[in-house]
Image: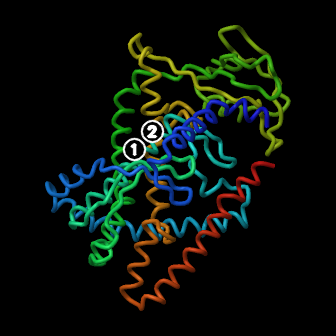
Amino acid sequence: MYEWFLEYWTVILFYVGISLVIYLNRKKFDFEGIVMLYKTKFGIKAMQKYAKKYPRLISSLATMGIWTGWLGMIVIIAMVFYGIYQLIFFPQAPAMFTPVLPGFQVPGGPRIPLITGLLALFIVIVVHEFAHGVVSKLHKIKIKSSGFAMVGPIPAAFVEPDEKALNKASVKKQLGIYAAGPFSNVLLAILIVIIQLGLVLAVLPGFTADGLTVVSSEFNDNLTGIKIIGADNTNISTAGDLHNFLNQRNPGDEILLTSPEGNIPVTLQSHPTDNTSAYMGVTLQQEIGAKGPLLQTVKPVVFWFIGNPFSTNLTSSLGLLGWIYLLSLGIGLVNLLPLGPVDGGRMLLITLKKYMNEKLAEKIWYYTSVTLVAMLILLIFVPIIRNMF
């Protein structure tokens, strides 16, 4: 527990600070369970502007969003069932679903960087809610408020349409409004891929892989902090180079690592999961060289933004754009789950009501929601508990 606190004390302080700010300003928030809403009129005029300026384009996108929403619903349901299948037959498989809590390492899931993760999450959620608002305005449905929200410790945003006016709208218009958020996340993910690919192709030639620094060592403490640039007269620039080198060695072999400080003898061990494979037991950080002083100066900003394509570590390899892509796709799909008040649940309920009596529709919707919630609880918490012990 003490080690955990040492690792996360800055993150804990950040969330405590946010909680304190909310508490001191609690009269300005509306509380709905664990959801705290700070209602404003922010962005509503912009939603009206775009709905009025591009009605045909937005109408076409809204229709595309409906079909994409149903397709996405099928995909996310399939993922849930596949996750349950893995949980039963392949319990060591990576978690299919994991909570999004920037700054913390959720057992069984990735560690999302605090500031980068919060910024990416904010962008994704604002795009999602703004899309709901634009399509609402397209169909002349009043938006009562918009603003900032907190779902427990996680920041969010919201758009609050007039529920009475929304419920009176045609089924197609309602579906278009509910599907707009997830569809905008899909479009954002596609846009991010295009931008990231272009930037990587533009700047990557200016950088080179420049060896590996040992962050920690399981068997040889004297390796920690050492930069590896070669092994047995073989150049080592990337983790891939080292992996290929070790594939040609056996447990018990003695190798000679090359570093700027000199040569270091190391005896290879057996891999924990395959005793026939050679294993060094080190955690590595990819070092990057820049071609020129200007690129060397801007290198941290460049790789923070576009990610580090040389890195094998998920956190550093993604960058801001990568996290926006992952969170946008993930949040868009999760919102299409046909359960409760999320977009997919609303889409399912109004569609069921169109083809059957209201009581039966609500009954099917309720049991679908309960079943999926139970499955999600298993998919989220079983891997967490398993990885804690």
Identify the residue at the far top of this view. Answer: 261
Q: Is residue 389 above or below residue 349?
A: above
The reply to whether the C-beta atoms of the residues labelled 2 and 1 are less than 8 Å apart is yes
Residues 360 and 88: in front is 360
Residues 23 and 303: in front is 23
Q: Give the image quarter of residue 286.
A: top right
Q: Position of residue 264 (x, y in %)?
A: 76, 14
Q: Residue at x 69, y 16 (%)?
A: 226
Three-letter code, disc 1: Ile
Residues 122 and 259: in front is 122
Q: Which mark is residue 95?
A: none
Three-letter code, disc 2: Leu
- 148 to the left or right of 235: left
Q: Position of residue 22 (x, y in %)?
A: 52, 43
Q: Give the image quarter of residue 197.
A: top left
Identify the residue at the far front of this view. Answer: 27
Q: Residue at x 71, y 55 (%)?
A: 383
Circle 1 sits on which residue? 123
Cα–Cα gap, marks 2 and 1: 6 Å
- 118 to the left or right of 228: left
Q: Give the image quarter of residue 269.
A: top right
According to the image, what is the colour scheme of the structure? Answer: rainbow
Tag 1's secondary structure?
helix
Q: Residue at x 38, y 88 (%)?
A: 355
- 53 to the left or right of 29: left
Identify the residue at the far left of this view. Answer: 53
Circle 2 sits on which residue? 119
Q: Residue at x 28, y 75 (%)?
A: 172
Crowd rating for badge 1 (residues with CA inside 10 Å; few <14, some 14–19, many 20+): some
Q: Is residue 183 above or below residue 360?
A: above
Tag 2's secondary structure?
helix
Q: Position of residue 62 (x, y in %)?
A: 27, 65
